[in-house]
Amino acid sequence: MTAEGERTEGEALAGGMANAGAVFRHGDLVERPAPRSAPALHAHLLALSEHGFDEVPRPVRLTADGRERLTFVPGDVALPPFPHWAMSATALRSVGNLLRRLHDASARIAVDADAEWPRSLADPAGGTMVCHNDVCPDNVVFRDGRATALIDFDMAAPGRAVWDVAMTARYWVPMLDPASAAPLYPAGLDVPTRLRLLADSYGLSPHERAELPDVIEQATASCRAFVADRVAEGDPVYTRALSERGGWQRWDRIQEWLAAHRRVFAGALAT
């Protein structure tokens, strides 16, 4: 590191799409583009620790050139195509447990109502606690095969717990038709069983379990709109990914598959 607002070359960290190629490790620190919500988000991350949840990066400072510095969280992060160890039942349970612990701490922290929280992936119903909204494999740190920390809170915003669980299910169950899942996930994953396992490990209430299939469909539509906005803006990373992963036909197929299997998922959650 050099003086405030300056950067030296560090180790580029792989993973993610929104900040691809712009995240660097410098020893025990990570430097990355700061989201517009950074002042409120940094206060929230510090408050999580005060409420017993230390499994997040600790903010260090904002730089004069619009970047943020946070502590580096050591461990393993699963990148696509996702390895078998990241999709084990043990790994999935640990993700559900970790998300519940995050929410339990977050629910005790007052939301900064004046902050410029991102809305792209946020719960359209709003909520009284700050949710992560992007608990994908790239943003979960593992040690010894278990999820131990969450990183990349760029999309964090107020919402309901069930929305964050739905967003998490999209990536970790995954809530994808077989053709869409095949290039990224190990073969043979039992979607209804894994959805129930996530709900059980998180500790969803009966009311939230009944809501979850519909909320997953809503979350999928929000993710599609997010990608559409990025592509319309000419973002090369999202434009390339859309092309390589089957275009809008893939999104159509996913949404049709979710609707067709809604009762199957509801039945799995009710058992």
Image (tube, helix red, strand yellow):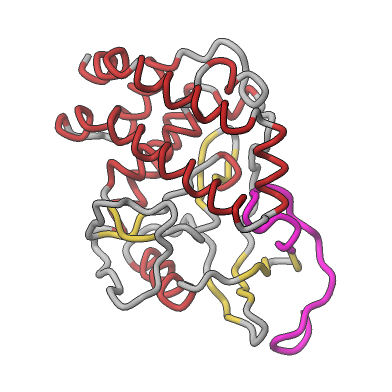
Residue sitting farthest toward the top: 188
* Main SS class of the magenta portion in the image: loop
Residue 31 located left or right of residue 189: right
The residue at the far right in this view is 9
Specify whether residue 156 is painted magenta: no
Above-or-below relation of 35 to 7: above
Please check the rendered image and state whether residue 2 is part of the magenta-colored stretch, yes or no. yes
Quadrant assignment, res 73: bottom right
Residue 181, image x, y percentages = 58, 22
- Residue at the farthest left position: 207
Q: Which residues are magenta?
A: 1-24
Q: Is residue 40 left or right of 162 when viewed as pictured? A: right
In this rendering, is residue 181 above or below 147? above
Quarter of the image with the C terminus is top left
Q: Nearer the viewer, residue 222 or 20?
A: 222
Q: Quadrant of the N terminus?
A: bottom right
Residue at 74 percent of width and 55 percent of height: 13
Counting from the top left corner in percent of width and height, residue 59 is at 53, 72
Q: Position of residue 129 (x, y in %)?
A: 27, 59
Indicate whether 212 appears above or below 126.
above
In front of the other: 73 or 178? 178
Q: Residue at x 34, y 31 (%)?
A: 201
Residue at the image point whose x is 22% and y is 29% from the top: 209
Q: How many marks?
A: 0
The spot of residue 86 in percent (x, y) is 59, 29
> Would residue 162 appear left or right of 75 to someone viewing this image?
left
